């Protein structure tokens, strides 16, 4: 099977995929990037200690942690001087990577938390005020209890503040509770996972550098039935050839492992001396989570995970999984990327310009084999079957649209609400028929990384409770590959590609 994508742009992209390549998932591949500043390996944090998670190019953020002082319930306490903050992102590794069986990967990102000093006259030896005026907080905190799977509550968050014009909702626990906001009415809807979590409401006004107070809502989701294996939600996990076990992901804490149901606990498995991998079914002793009727009790559940074999194969061009090779209309070569291994050279270095679109079939990429292969450290040469060099450079359009941050799937917009505020230009006037058009940002093609973006002709919020909206899949050259109409019903997406 082969796939070929041709786009009308300064570059043409063409690649074959005979098999699914499997590089190791790393922080570099995840590429966490500040939402505000666009800087790699950073997140955003405001004066109140509210965290805005970074954008990821690959993977999904499952949870965050920090050993910094003042960190609690996914928020930092305010500070009186610029303070470096570091959070550890626990990222779910997507399929298609050599370490996908590990389930998760930890990646550290940093930010500078600015001081919050709203007092008109700063305390002695403290910096001058860093914000002034703005909304005031009338009620610091509240709580709500919801029944798992069906409970919901609508809260007028306007009662918590004075002199505000809008609100930001911060919710990192969408497997327990989802939210939607209409005006000042915040609706919280319980999901199937019982837990006690925190949702933050930040109020703002239209002023410049005004203070933004935060109200805390403690949400308890209970009335779950007894925890059973059907709720374990196992995924990933692996065993090395020598027998070292990496636990799978689970909705409950794993308290032990056994070869049999309720049997003696083990910390490792027998070595696999065969060259091929094998599937091993183990029994996992889970501790039922809180808010289940059997909370704290042991529940034994079986789950199969792969165990690696001993053989090391030779690194090939298929393993390298080359992608993104391009040639500009000026003949400049973009060597692209390798899913595995390191690109160290390519030939030719440049092509002559052409007056018509021309397929180049002799672009050779040299890749160094990574560790774990029999030819590790050696170079192999991989010839790309065909890359089209275009004869022109397309221009950017003049029609204004607004897009959101990128998501890996249109359904990902249904776990909450998302702002559609980034201004882009397109040489087309209609959202639903824009497939094949180029999206430009600041007069250059927008690198969409093949992610999906909510799009609107106005700056709005989309997601749960907002009705129908559209998404564009935008590739690395700004070309719209797919157009999806989306409506979110109960956290689920309806609608398909146009």
Image (cartoon, rainbow, N blue to C red):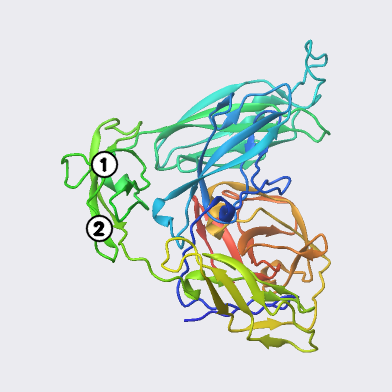
Between 314 and 146, the residue placed more toward the observer is 314
- Quadrant for residue 140, please give it: top right
Residue 325 appears in view? no
Residue 433 appears in view? yes
Q: Which mark is residue 184?
A: none
Q: Which residue is identified by label 2?
A: 272
Q: Is residue 458 left or right of residue 273?
A: right
Residue drawn where x is 61% and y is 42% of the image: 53
**Alpha-carbon span between mark 2 and mark 1:** 16 Å
Tell us which disc is closer to us: 2 or 1.
2
User: From the viewer's perspective, is residue 312 above or below residue 326?
Assistant: above
User: From the viewer's perspective, is residue 222 above or below residue 150?
Assistant: above
Between 396 and 337, the residue placed more toward the observer is 337
Q: Position of residue 369 (x, y in %)?
A: 50, 67
Q: Position of residue 280 (x, y in %)?
A: 24, 56
Q: Which residue is identified by label 1?
A: 267
């Amino acid at each position: 099977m082969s796939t070929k994508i041709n786009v009308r742009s300064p570059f043409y992209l063409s690649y074959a995929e005979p098999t699914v390549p499997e590089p190791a998932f790393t922080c570099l591949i995840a590429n966490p990037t500040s939402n505000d500043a666009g800087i790699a390996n950073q997140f955003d944090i405001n004066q109140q200690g509210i965290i805005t998670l970074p954008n990821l190019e690959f993977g999904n953020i499952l949870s965050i942690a920090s050993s910094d002082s003042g960190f609690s319930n996914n928020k930092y306490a305010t500070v009186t001087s610029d303070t470096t903050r570091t959070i550890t992102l626990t990222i779910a590794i997507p399929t298609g990577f050599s370490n996908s069986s590990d389930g998760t990967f930890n990646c550290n990102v940093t930010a500078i938390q600015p001081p919050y000093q709203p007092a008109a006259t700063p305390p002695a030896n403290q910096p001058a005020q860093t914000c002034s005026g703005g909304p005031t907080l009338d009620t610091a905190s509240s709580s709500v209890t919801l029944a798992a799977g069906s409970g919901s509550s609508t809260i007028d968050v306007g009662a918590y503040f004075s002199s505000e014009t809008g609100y930001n909702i911060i919710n990192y626990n969408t497997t327990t509770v989802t939210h939607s906001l209409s005006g000042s009415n915040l609706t919280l809807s319980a999901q199937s996972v019982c837990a006690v979590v925190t949702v933050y409401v930040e109020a703002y006004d239209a002023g410049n550098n005004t203070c933004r107070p935060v109200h805390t809502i403690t949400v308890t989701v209970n009335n779950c039935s007894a925890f059973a294996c059907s709720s374990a939600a196992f995924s990933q996990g692996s065993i090395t050839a020598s027998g070292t076990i990496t636990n799978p992901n689970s909705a409950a804490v794993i308290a032990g492992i056994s070869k049999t149901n309720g049997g003696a606990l083990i910390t490792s498995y027998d070595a696999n001396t065969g060259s091929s991998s094998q599937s091993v079914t183990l029994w996992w002793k889970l501790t039922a989570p809180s808010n289940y009727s059997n909370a704290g009790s042991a529940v034994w559940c079986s789950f199969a995970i792969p165990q690696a074999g001993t053989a090391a194969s030779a690194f090939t061009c298929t393993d390298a999984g080359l992608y993104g090779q391009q040639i500009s209309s000026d003949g400049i070569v973009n060597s692209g990327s390798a899913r595995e291994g390191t690109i160290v050279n390519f030939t030719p270095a440049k092509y002559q310009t052409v007056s018509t679109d021309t397929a180049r079939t002799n672009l050779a990429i040299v890749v160094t084999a990574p560790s774990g292969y029999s030819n590790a450290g050696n170079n192999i040469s991989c010839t790309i079957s065909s890359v089209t060099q275009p004869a022109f450079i397309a221009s950017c359009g003049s029609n204004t649209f607004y897009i959101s941050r990128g998501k890996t799937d249109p359904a990902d917009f249904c776990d909450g609400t998302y702002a559609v505020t980034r201004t882009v230009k397109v040489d087309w006037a209609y959202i639903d028929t824009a497939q094949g058009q180029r999206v430009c940002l600041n007069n250059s093609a927008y690198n969409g990384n093949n992610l999906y973006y909510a799009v609107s002709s106005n700056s709005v919020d989309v997601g749960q409770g907002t009705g129908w909206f559209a998404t564009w899949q935008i590739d690395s050259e700004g070309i719209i590959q797919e157009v999806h109409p989306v409506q979110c019903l109960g956290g689920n997406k309806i609608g398909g590609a146009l």
